[in-house]
Amino acid sequence: MSIAPVSVESDLDPFDEATLLDPLPAWREVRDLGPAAYLRRYDMWFLGRYDEVKAALRGWETFSSANGIGLNDAVNEAWSQALINLDPPAHTQQRPLFTEKLSPHALKPVADTIQARADDLVAGLLGRGDVDAVTDLAHDLPVNVIMDLIGWPHDERDRILEMAAPWFETMGPRNERAERAETRVQEMMAYLHQAVVEERLAPGGFGASLIEAHKAGAIPIEGAVGLLAGYVVAAFDTTIAAIAAGTWLFATHPDEWEIVRAQPDLVPNAVNEVLRLETPIQYFSRVTTRDVDLGEGVLIPEGSRVIVGYGAANRDERHYPDPDRFDVRRRAGDQLAFSYGRHACAGQGLAKLETTAVFTAMARQVRRIELVGEPVLAPTNTTRAFASVPVRLS
């Protein structure tokens, strides 16, 4: 690879422990360097500005997913048949298998059920007082709603949640975090493969439809397992992270919570603002199919791996005035937490539905959200999330 101009080179390590816990200074540094910065440590480029990230996500022909979106060769090879690692035409052919169960039309019959479950969940937690916004509040809907849609056996749901968690570590660079997680992800893939082979998923669910598509010859078994894994992995941790982060933000910004309580119709917008500020998936990557001139002296060579910074773009002061401020009235519908373009998250409708249902239920029932302990962050190589957010719901 040709060496980048000195003005856009950086020794920054976005994946060291301190930066994972507090990435904002690093993001600001790379944004200020230029429209992209070459990370010498990883031989990769980093996109952190909103306009450049959105353009890269839109331009799949130039910023391709076909060589994998992870940041190391091993994970990209292992997941080569997953939908997220396909470009058209293969992506176009397989995506409906994923989105059919997640379209607005398909989700409409379950929307009332999800809201009712959220209402009951919050009412039950109010009776307890002090709760953990992660395990007590955020886990319930993502786990059980998705598992019902997949058709997953009830007695195996906790196990699959635990097995899915390390996947986001393996998507990062080849560091200690990724290596520690590899064995657990291999166990999950073997487990999902066995579930497809043994046809253990309930009829009528997403899992059963993948099995039927495989048996009909529409997709190879690797494709069926990859789609199932995408459903399992993406649906849990990201939605849990959003609900927990939103609870933390409202607890630390009581004035914003008062606004939402007074105007519950702001909940969907507030959810977008939560996703913008605390973007669950921070990074994936693409590979350039040609030289890309971004201006300001920045030329990304053909064949370069480019880290796409969703979280960094969502904090870009060039696009969002005062970007580090939590503002439930901000027009945040264009946030990039769910990616954009052909590879936009197919499950974002369900994620927003669940997150909105939880905060709608809380706006109806909860007067005050207070922190009663120190929140604990649990970032991975590619995600930002809380392990614990102790709160009191009044």
Image: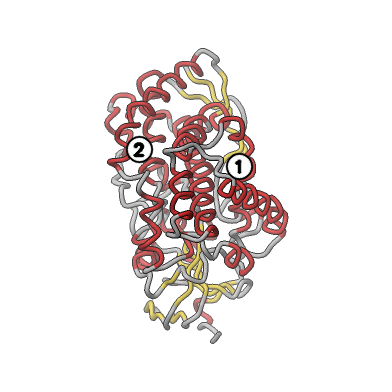
Packing grade of label 1 (10 A; few <14, some 14-19, many >=20) is some
Above or below, 183 relative to 303: above
Circle 1 is placed at which residue position? 377
In this view, the residue in front, 68 or 154, is 154
Identify residue for label 2.
Answer: 270
Q: Residues within 10 Å of mark 2 (few under 14, many from 20)?
A: many
- The answer to whether the residues at label 1 and label 2 have Cβ atoms under 8 Å apart is no
From the top left corner, tell me how far across and down residue 138 is, in percent: 51, 32
Snapshot quadrant of residue 352: top left
Looking at the picture, which amino acid does disc 2 mark? Ala
Q: Residue at x 30, y 39 (%)?
A: 329
Q: How is the image coloured?
A: secondary structure
First-in-chain label (1 vs 2): 2
The outermost residue toward the front is 216
Q: Secondary structure at mark 1?
A: strand
Callout 2: helix, strand or loop? helix
The percent position of residue 286, horizontal first and vertical second, equals 48, 69
| Residue 363 % position (x, y) | 36, 24
Q: Residue furthest bottom?
A: 2
At x 47%, y 46%, the residue is: 278
Q: Is residue 381 left or right of residue 357?
A: right
Q: Is residue 386 above or below residue 341?
A: above
Quarter the N terminus occupies: bottom right
Specify whether 184 is left or right of 358.
right
Question: Which quadrant of the structure image shows residue 319?
Answer: bottom left
Q: Position of residue 19 (x, y in %)?
A: 60, 55
